[in-house]
Image (tube, rainbow, N blue to C red):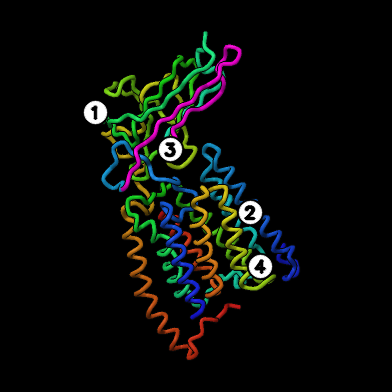
Amino acid sequence: MIWAVPSRSPARALVISAYVLAVEVMRTVVMRAPGAVVPALILGGAALMLIALGIPAQRLGLGTSRLPLRIVGGLALGAVLLLPAAARSGAAPLLPAGLAAAAVAVSIGEEIAFRGALFAALEDLGGAPLAIVGSTLLWTLAHALSHPPEFLGAVAAAGLVLALWRWACRDLVGPILGHVIADLAL
Amino acid sequence: MKKLALMAAAAIIYVFAAWMVAPGFYDGFGPPQPYNWTCPPPQAGANIKPGPGHVTIKVIGGKSDANSAFTNDGQIVIGFLPDAFDATGKSSISVDIKPLDTCPQPTGIKFVTNVYLITADAPLKKSSNLVLRYSTLEPDPSDVYQAPDPNGPWKSIGKNQQAQPFTVDTSTSSLGYFAAGYPAASPPPAAIRVGGGQLLPIIVAALIVVVVLAGLPLAVLRRRRSPGGSEEEDDS
């Protein structure tokens, strides 16, 4: 596993970055095929989760201590992510029920990959600033193919909020929960 | 406090950035832009009128080229195969798409999209693929309907397996008026949806209430247990 590479080696961060970017790009391309949206989302989410194999849960921010606070934090993150769409009221899209499971899979996969494995690798390499900025940049880049350019500012800002939470609270449960809530509601 | 301030600043930046684009945060599941209505439903808010589309298709060696016609807002796309038109005596074929200015609601059918007129200056001889985008504010359509005149008769030309969320695909062997909808007598298809829409403000309000009601006591308890009030507790 890639986690066996020495922690301060740039190779680990580079391999993880390349892997998550490749999975995200492949998922976006496959989703364009007729009838492939749900399978692409579920398989893409699973492929993103694979990068965390062998990494201790605590290193990903997935411990169970302070769980009630982590859950409340996730709800708060969900509220922040949804706030602009809620204020717009009627302009908010609805997610068809068939996509709900796929949305959950890809939300969890993205958090484990970007704010979990990639964040931890970058933090080992260059500390918290590199982890926050690097994971946010990669997250934004990964969405460049699936989102129109005018959305990338909001995508980057959402990534920054989630990465800051991951750093400040040493927690990934909150970002996962917030991301899932936002994806289910939008 | 520094961490809290940074997170608050990031949240403000996010709200500002997301406010600039509708719907804000989405992960590639929703349509990137609101539907442009001829007759907007009450909940639509600000509305831009739908636009027309045009394409000129070359005729090479007596056969029309492959091409597609679409409106500027991408709400309807029709794709033509090579030799799709009877191009006898023509050097090019002009295809126009125009949204109808009115919103017919024929008996027994509930349209969930605008009605579009697609015309060409040559007859079709091969089926063409038609894709209509629909709004998030209406139920999913079960069929695409076609008519030679806005007053009907409207007939279903079915739909193919959904290729993308919020789009409906079908094929047509002739041009005319097109709209997507569902039989008015039946319940709206796929009416059960997850979250969003008019419920969204309620969902967010409920989240805020839960966070405040549960978060404050948890934070107080945590400070009492940890005299330093440190937020640095880690799992490792």
What residue is pinned by disc 3? B73
Q: Which residue appears at 52% of the width and 18% of the height? A: B84
Q: Do the residues at discs 1 and 3 belong to one chain?
A: yes
Measure how far apart labels 1 and 3 are at the Cα level.
29 Å
- Depth check: give the residue in front, A76 or B64: B64
Per the image, the residue denoted by label 1 is B107
Using the image, tell me which numbered label, if any, was put on residue A122: 4
Chain under disc 1: B
Q: Is residue A5 above or below residue B97?
A: below
- Could you tell me which secondary element the residue under label 4 belongs to? helix
Whether callout 2 and callout 1 share a subunit is answered no
Q: Magenta segment, which residues?
A: B46-73
Between B51 and B204, the residue placed more toward the observer is B51
- Residue drawn at x 52%, y 17% is B92
For the residue marked with disc 4, what is the amino acid? Leu
From the top left corner, tell me how far across and down residue A71 is, in percent: 45, 70
Say if mark 3 contacts mark 4, CB within 8 Å: no
The disc label shown at residue A21, or none: 2
CA distance separating discs 2 and 1 = 51 Å
